Amino acid sequence: MKKVTCGKKEHEATMRRVKEGILASSDVEKVCKIFRMLSEPTRMKIVLALLKGDVCVYHLMEVCDGTQSGVSHQLRVLRDNGIVKAQRIGQNVEYSIADEHIREIVEMGLAHLQCAND
C-alpha cells in the first residue's frame, strides 16, 4: 500500500514531532477516565463545591439537590478514581479535592467557558 502524505517537504519531521507527543494507549485511557469522571453533572457539582473548601456529604446533598445515598455513591466513584479524598472528623467525613491537578483542570474548564461566552 502506498504511503499517504500531506505533500509538504517537512512531512516526516512533522510526523516525528507529532508522534513524540502521543502517550501510550494505556496512559491515554487513564487521562480519558479522569475526564469521564468529571463529565457527569452531579460529580461536577460535587467537584465545584469542593473547590470552595472541604465539606461533608450533607452540604453536598444541598448543592446537588440529591439524596444522601445518591451523593455518597458519586463521592465513592470520585474517591475510587482519585478525584476526591475523604477524612473522618468526629462522626462526619469531610471531602476535599485529591490534588491540585484536579483543581487546575476544572479551573481551566471554567476559564475556557468564560472565553467562549465573551
Image (tube, rainbow, N blue to C red):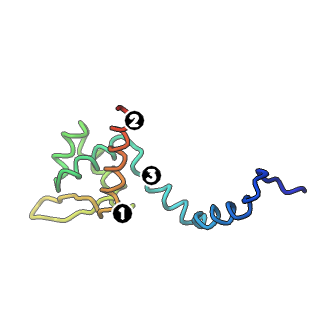
Residue at 16% in and 46% down: 59
Q: How far apart are marks 2 and 3 (CA)?
A: 19 Å
- Tell me the residue that label 3 is attached to: 35
Q: Which of marks 2 and 1 is in front?
A: 2
Residue at 9% in and 64% down: 90
- Density class for disc 3 (Cα within 10 Å; few <14, some 14-19, many ≥20) is few
> Which sits in the foreground, 51 or 71?
51
Residue at 35% in and 32% down: 118
- Tell me the residue that label 2 is attached to: 116
- Reading the chain from its start, which is encountered first: label 2 or label 1? 1
- Specify whether 34 is left or right of 65: right
Pinpoint residue 108: horizontal percent, then vertical percent: 35, 50
- Specify whether 13 is left or right of 68: right
State the SS at label 2. helix
- Tell me the residue that label 1 is attached to: 82
Q: How far apart are marks 2 and 1 (CA)?
A: 29 Å
**Marks 2 and 1 in Cβ contact (< 8 Å):** no
- Density class for disc 1 (Cα within 10 Å; few <14, some 14-19, many ≥20) is some
- Reading the chain from its start, which is encountered first: label 2 or label 3? 3
Pinpoint residue 32: horizontal percent, then vertical percent: 50, 55
- Specify whether 31 is left or right of 93: right
User: What residue type is disc 2 on?
Assistant: Ala
State the SS at label 1. loop
Q: Which of marks 2 and 3 is in front?
A: 2
